[in-house]
Amino acid sequence: METTTDSIVQRLEALAHPVRLGVFRLLVRRAPEGATPGELQAMLGKAPSTLSAHLAQLRSAGLVEVVREGRSLRYSADLDALGGLVDYLVADCCRGRADLCAPLARGALSRAEAPVGAARPLGVLFICTGNTARSILSEAILRHLGGSRFRALSAGTRPEGVVNPLTLRVLEAHGIDTEGLRSKSLDEIAADATARPDLVFTVCDRAAAEECPVWLGDAVVAHWGLPDPAASGGTEAERLAAFEAAYRTIRRRLEALVALRVEEMDRAELQRAVDRIILAERTGNSTEMGALK
């Protein structure tokens, strides 16, 4: 949508409602990935019909875009439209006095540029639904690889309460300690101030239309999905092979994470780095894949 006075007024009117403002802020926070209606409903606690009406108005104002993913929709903030709105509001700010305009950006920039893990281990949380296989594998492998530099945790939105025996079998076969691993609720992590993570990975499989948990805390968030080995069928040998495949994928990704100088990174740098790891895997980029070996 072209940035005109009329379009600016339309965007401001669209944002002048607490629900629509909340939706848009969440989508901006989750850019460029966006969110499905189900994820937005879980985060905001609004009825589907109510949320649909607000999303339609945000789309009409040119603030939100939507794409179809199979049988579902994914909404995302139009960052160009947001940039146009901000530029319009601060154009010729203080007649070009950059020193006076600096506070406009100071809050967002200081947060993005704050060091993430300089003075303490980087807290990393892996979340899925049942917390029985992929997220447990990730927690154990990062503990093994990361040493004192990382503090690894895992949780689920609907934890099964028992770790899958094949998860433990694969970890033990690779010499990774399984002591203390348990299936636990995401609510437990959210309620414990000492467990608040700096970095959160969702490991659900969107390609299989699997429900992905939502983390509302103040952390860098990335999606590192992979098929659930616990959902694999066949013989015990075939099921074990599925767990081995998940182990190899997770370990490759976490080796790349551990190789990063996270102690020197701010939030924006860390977000770009973890996004590049999964992008390199998906595209098979020969240069970027070097970090995954």
Image: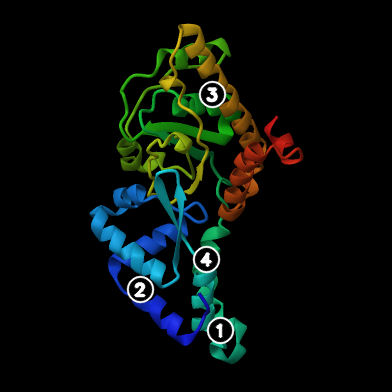
Q: Earlier in the sequence, mark 3 or mark 2?
A: 2
Q: Quarter-wise, where is residue 97 in the image?
A: bottom right
> What's the CA distance linking mark 4 and mark 3?
35 Å
Residues packed near mark 3 inside 10 Å, few (<14), some (14 to 19) or many (20 plus) = many
Residues packed near mark 1 inside 10 Å, few (<14), some (14 to 19) or many (20 plus) = few
Q: Earlier in the sequence, mark 4 or mark 3?
A: 4
Residue at point 51%, 31% (across, down): 226
Q: Position of residue 240 (x, y in %)?
A: 50, 12
Q: Name the disc covering residue 246, or none.
A: 3
Choose mark 3 or mark 2, whichever is in front: 2
Residue where numbered disc 2 is placed:
14
**Relative depth, front residue between 285 and 255:** 285
- Contact (CB < 8 A) between labels 4 and 1? no
Residue at point 66%, 40% (across, down): 283
Residue where numbered disc 1 is placed:
100
Q: Is residue 94 visible?
A: yes
Q: Is residue 249 above or below residue 206?
A: above
Q: Tell me which amino acid carries mark 4.
A: Leu
Numbered disc 3: secondary structure? helix
